């Protein structure tokens, strides 16, 4: 009886599920940036090639209906976690070969595909297992553990790679392969834990029994998505999903290279260990606290009440990078404080996007519809991110960050036209 109670409690599976969701994402989007930078690639090439790795998150609606209709969400989660472990092993192996770039990019792409599919299944499982209020209340918790995975990726993996480079006399490819082999063992442990602890829900069932039903379900999922709102409101909703994070899309990869490039290249020259502390730990703690606060505030007062404060939070703190590009501080405490402020704001502001996607996806085919929303949002990250390195190389870090601040106006503009139920997210008091 005790085992059954534990397995039904969301606290037993939400933390590890979203660690498993966040870790491959941070490896592909941030750890890979640092690794390729240390292996000698330019900012333009890093942004372009790692930007392509976001493509699976953009096109995942093409196969998200299969996750809805074939097998169960639990089956998809476990299968993708095994595939993620295999792709990590592939990166580790190919790093020390003559075709290291082609090999690692291929396995990173496999990792991105597996992670995008894992996201579909995990988010669908989350929505099936929890009611509306629980979904809003746990959004801060799930984002917290997602961010803890980011802390582990940036604040542990990158510094460990830096320390191993000291031990093995700067053999960068070899030390990074050791890091990835360690990740293989971690994902194996996550898979074993989830195989035991994740409940088999009656609501978690496949909906298609043959090819015709599956095809019909796919067509229906796409059709109903674009019929959720009147055409004018649907346009505004798509623009919000696409452009809400536009400034952050430009800032993401270049903030990493700015912190780690040497002074001669316009950067702050942080070591991997200093970067791990300032950005990967202090920064992600700020991100996590902002996410928790956002979930608590929306759960208390409703999402709409806090929408505009969240918009301000995700945009205005970006100015710290303008300051650092002019002041060029060498004090790690000051740098960490600036990063904390910006990341706290991002965590608080990102809650608005997560809640809007949950609100928009409500109803039939919610797993597929949520996947469509996240895909559009990722497209808004991918395309500007691919161009960010070229923009930075053309403008320099200082002018690049000023342009990013000016483009924050886009976030305000797309938010002004969306409509949200004022009661969404509020706790519903039970009647006696």
Image (tube, rainbow, N blue to C red):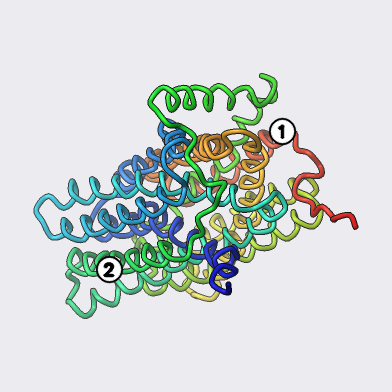
Q: Position of residue 222 (x, y in %)?
A: 52, 25
Please state which of residues 125 and 84 is positioned toward the viewer in this rendering. Answer: 125
User: In the picture, residue 183 is in which quadrant?
Assistant: bottom left
Please state which of residues 217 and 41 is positioned toward the viewer in this rendering. Answer: 217
Please state which of residues 272 and 284 is positioned toward the viewer in this rendering. Answer: 284
Q: Position of residue 249 (x, y in %)?
A: 49, 44
Q: Find disc 2 in the rendering and name its residue.
A: 179
Vertical placement of residue 427 versus 373, above or below: below
For the residues marked 2 and 1, what is the alpha-carbon distance in whole angstroms? 44 Å
Which badge, 2 or 1, comes first in the chain's sequence? 2
Q: Residue furthest left?
A: 98
Q: Secondary structure at mark 1?
A: loop
Q: Residue furthest top?
A: 231
Task: Judge from the rendering whether residue 119 lies leftward or rightward of residue 344; answer left or right.
Answer: left
Determine the residue positioned at 74% across, 54% down: 298
Q: Quadrant of the N terminus?
A: bottom right
Q: Is residue 272 visible?
A: yes
Q: Find disc 1 in the rendering and name its residue.
A: 418
Task: Judge from the rendering whether residue 177 lies leftward or rightward of residue 47; answer left or right.
Answer: left
Determine the residue positioned at 32% across, 74% down: 160
User: In the picture, residue 337 is in which quadrant?
Assistant: bottom right
Pointer 1 local density, CA inside 10 Å: few below 14, some 14–19, many at least 20: some
Q: Residue furthest bottom?
A: 167
Please state which of residues 85 and 285 is positioned toward the viewer in this rendering. Answer: 85
The mark total stands at 2
Task: Judge from the rendering whether residue 158 lies leftward or rightward of residue 292; answer left or right.
Answer: left
Q: Secondary structure at mark 2?
A: helix
Q: Is residue 242 visible?
A: no
């Amino acid at each position: 009886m005790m085992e059954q109670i534990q397995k039904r409690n969301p606290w037993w599976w939400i933390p590890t599920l979203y660690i498993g969701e966040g870790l491959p994402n941070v490896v592909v989007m941030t750890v890979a940036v640092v690794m390729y930078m240390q292996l000698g690639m330019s900012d333009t090439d890093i942004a372009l090639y790692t930007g392509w790795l976001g493509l699976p998150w953009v096109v995942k609606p093409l196969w998200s209906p299969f996750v809805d209709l074939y097998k169960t969400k639990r089956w998809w989660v476990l299968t993708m976690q095994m595939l993620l472990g295999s792709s990590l092993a592939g990166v580790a192996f190919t790093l020390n070969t003559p075709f290291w770039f082609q090999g690692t990019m291929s396995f990173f792409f496999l990792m991105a595909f597996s992670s995008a599919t894992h996201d579909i299944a995990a988010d669908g499982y989350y929505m099936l297992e929890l009611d509306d209020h629980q979904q809003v209340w746990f959004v801060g918790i799930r984002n917290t553990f997602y961010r803890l995975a980011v802390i582990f990726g940036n604040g542990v993996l990158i510094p460990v790679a830096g320390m191993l480079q000291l031990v093995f006399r700067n053999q960068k490819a070899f030390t990074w392969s050791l890091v990835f082999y360690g990740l293989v063992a971690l994902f194996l442990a996550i898979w074993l834990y989830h195989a035991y602890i994740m409940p088999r829900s009656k609501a978690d069932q496949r909906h298609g029994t043959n090819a015709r039903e599956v095809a019909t379900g796919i067509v229906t999922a796409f059709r109903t998505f674009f019929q959720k709102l009147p055409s004018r409101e649907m346009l505004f909703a798509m623009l919000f999903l696409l452009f809400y994070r536009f400034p952050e899309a430009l800032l993401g990869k270049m903030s990493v290279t700015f912190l780690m490039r040497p002074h001669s290249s316009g950067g702050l020259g942080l070591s991997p260990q200093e970067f791990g502390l300032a950005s990967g730990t202090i920064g992600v703690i700020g991100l996590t606290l902002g996410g928790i606060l956002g979930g608590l505030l929306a759960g208390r007062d409703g999402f709409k009440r806090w929408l505009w404060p969240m918009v301000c939070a995700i945009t205005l703190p970006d100015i710290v990078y303008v300051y650092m590009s002019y002041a060029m501080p060498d004090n790690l405490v000051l740098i960490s404080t600036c990063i904390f402020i910006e990341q706290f704001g991002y965590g608080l502001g990102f809650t608005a996007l997560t809640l809007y996607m949950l609100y928009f996806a409500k109803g039939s085919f919610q797993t597929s519809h949520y996947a469509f929303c996240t895909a559009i949002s990722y497209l808004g990250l991918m395309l500007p991110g691919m161009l960010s390195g070229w923009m930075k190389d053309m403008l320099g870090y200082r002018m690049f960050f000023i342009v990013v601040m000016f483009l924050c106006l886009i976030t305000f503009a797309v938010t002004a036209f969306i409509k949200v139920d004022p009661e969404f997210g509020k706790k519903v008091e039970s009647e006696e």
